[in-house]
Image (cartoon, coloured by chain):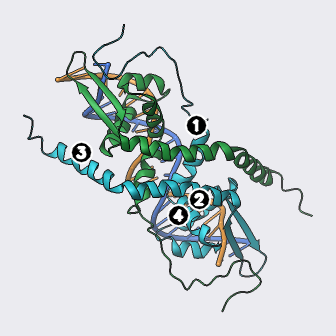
Chain colours: A green, B cyan, C blue, D orange
Amino acid sequence: MKSPGSACDTDDGDPFQWDTREDCEVRQILDRIADKWSLLVIALLDQRCLRFTELRRRIDGVSQRMLAVTLRHLERDGLVKRTVHPVVPPRVDYELTPLGRSLHATIQALVDWTETHQGEIAAARSNYDERLTEPAALT
Amino acid sequence: MKSPGSACDTDDGDPFQWDTREDCEVRQILDRIADKWSLLVIALLDQRCLRFTELRRRIDGVSQRMLAVTLRHLERDGLVKRTVHPVVPPRVDYELTPLGRSLHATIQALVDWTETHQGEIAAARSNYDERLTEPAALT
DNA sequence: CAGTATCCTATCGGATACTG
DNA sequence: CAGTATCCGATAGGATACTG
């Protein structure tokens, strides 16, 4: 029943299935940190508390809208604490919660991995790309 | 020059800037694992080598197109090895490279974090949401 | 200052049809 | 079996204008 001579045995009898859709828990947090600006915001706020405009200045290229949306998401997930000071002009401080700091520490492992292996990845990409552009060495 | 009475000192004099755009290295791999199917493919292939159709069956809801695109990306980044067996009907095996296994191990930390803290996240969301729907307790 | 509202576009990903 | 090609809708995100 099994195809021999292969490194992979294909007994697809065992029906091990994964939580394939959005109900997978890790998706929730992955969608959060993977969007364009969240990770940057978390990294900055882990250094110190910042105001809205300070964040805008430090994150080059972020639009006012997207910074607001990003902060709202992070606040909703309990990763960022928003503090409104009732003064004029208004002043709002953003800081990481303990949960946010904990997440940032965990993400740091991924950042470190990327720095360590970025050379391998770049090499793999070059290899893959040139293999497509010059299909010369066939023999 | 500084606004006193705040927990946050706002000396925005220090110009610590981040790599805000796509040239940030971690973005490369974050964009890879954060798309809809890559993480699932990596997780499955870390258990064992699989064929195209086997992956399709195990990943409920993935389209033929997106599975192909996902695998091509992972292959290009050197995370997945593609092996074509010259037989009819064609047979193609996919397996993680050592680099891919290494990445999956690193991601696992994030998965574990999510499982540990999903309760806190859910609680924060409920809290945030109900605070919007019932703005009653103001006093 | 710290947002919200509106509009618009680019990319992601699904459905379907076709092929070596 | 293992894809590719084409079309098409949904959504992320940018630009701009307005507000408490």
Q: Please provide percent x and percent y for residue D20.
A: 17, 23
Between discs 3 and 1, the one toward the N terminus: 1
The amino acid type found where label 4 is placed reads Leu
Q: Which callout, 3 or 1, points to the residue nearer the camera? A: 3
Distance CA(mark 3)–CA(mark 1) = 32 Å
Local crowd at mark 3 within 10 Å, few (<14), some, or many (≥20)? some
Judged by depth in the image, the label closer to the viewer, 4 or 3, is 3
Query: Helix, strand or loop at disc 4?
Result: helix
Mark on residue B22? Answer: 1
Contact between labelled residues 1 and 3, with CB atoms less than 8 Å apart: no
Query: Mark 4 to mark 3: distance in Å?
Result: 30 Å
Which type of secondary structure does the marked residue at label 2 adopt? Answer: helix
Q: Earlier in the sequence, mark 4 or mark 1?
A: 1
Circle 2/circle 4 CB separation < 8 Å: no
Which residue position is annotated with label 4?
B40
Label 2: chain letter: B
Q: Position of residue B55 (x, y in %)?
A: 57, 72
Chain containing the residue with disc 1: B
Of pointers 2 and 1, the one earlier in the residue sequence: 1
At label 2, the amino acid type is His
Horizontal side, residue D3 vs residue A41: left or right = right
